[in-house]
Image: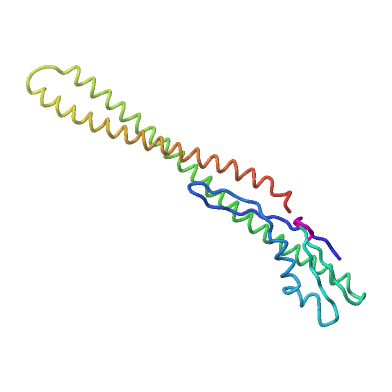
Amino acid sequence: DAVLKIGKKVKLVPTSGISSSVVEYIENPGTLAETIPLLYASEVNVASGYHLDVQKVGSLGMIKLILKGPDKGLARILKKLVDLLIDEHRRKAKDSVVAYKNFVKKLEVDAKMIQENIVVTDASIKEMKRKEGEYLVIIESSRAGIKEEKSRGDRSAFLNMLYLKTIDKERELSSLRGNLRNIQWQLIMHRITLGNLDEYK
C-alpha cells in the first residue's frame, strides 16, 4: 500500500470588481478514491490478477492505495501508479500557477496603464487651472470701454466651460486613483498567494 497526500492548486474566483483566489485540492480526495481504480485499471493490469483499492484517509486530504495480487511485480506496479499520479498532479498544479501568473502580469500592465493615465489627467488639470488663472488676470486687468464688456462676457463663458471641464477631469482622476488602489490591493494579495504555493506541492 501507499499513502498519498493530495497537493493543491490556485484558482481564480471572479467576483464583483475584484478577482480573488482560492487554493484548493488539485482533485477532491473522495472523487479520486472512486475514479483512480477505473482510470488506471490498465496500468494495474487487472487481467493478471491484481486488484486496486483506493480509500480516502478520514477527513484529511490524503488517499491510500492498496494493491493486491501476486508478489512478483506488485511493488513495481504500485510505484508506477504513484509516479503517474504525482506527475499528473504536478502538471495540473503547474498549469494553474502559469494561468495565475499570467493574470497577475495582466493586472500589473493594467496598473501601469492607469498610472500613466493619472499622470496625463493630472497634467491636464494643472494646465486648465493655469489657463483659468491667466484669463482671470486678463478679465481683472481689462475694464475699459463698452467693447470690452462683450469680450468679458465671452471670457466669462470660456471660464465657465474651463471650470466644468476641470471638474470632469478631477472626477476622472479620482476614479482612476480608486481603480489603481483596487488593482494594487489585488496584486498584494495575489503575490502573497503565489509566494505561499510552494508549501502546497
Question: What kind of colouring is applied to the model shown?
Answer: rainbow
| 169 to the left or right of 8 | left
Residue 150 position in % (x across, y down): 10, 26
Vertical placement of residue 20 versus 138, above or below: below
Q: Residue at x 35, y 29 (%)?
A: 126
Vertical placement of residue 42 versus 142, above or below: below
Vertical placement of residue 13 versus 182, above or below: below
| 53 to the left or right of 96 | right
Vertical placement of residue 79 versus 72, above or below: above
Magenta stretch: helix, strand or loop mostly: loop
Residue 85 position in % (x across, y down): 75, 65
Q: Residue at x 81, y 69 (%)?
A: 80
Q: Residue at x 74, y 63 (%)?
A: 87
Residue 188 position in % (x across, y down): 59, 40
Q: Residue furthest bottom?
A: 47
**Number of marks in picture:** 0
Q: Residue furthest right?
A: 71
Q: Residue at x 26, y 23 (%)?
A: 134
| 122 to the left or right of 6 | left
Assign the N terminus to one quadrant of the image.
bottom right
Assign the C terminus to one quadrant of the image.
bottom right
Which range of residues does the magenta coloring cover? 57-61
Q: Nearer the viewer, residue 24 or 168?
A: 24
Residue 167 position in % (x across, y down): 32, 32
Q: Residue furthest front?
A: 58
Hey, which quadrant is residue 163 in on the image? top left
Hey, which quadrant is residue 99 in on the image? bottom right
Magenta span includes 155: no
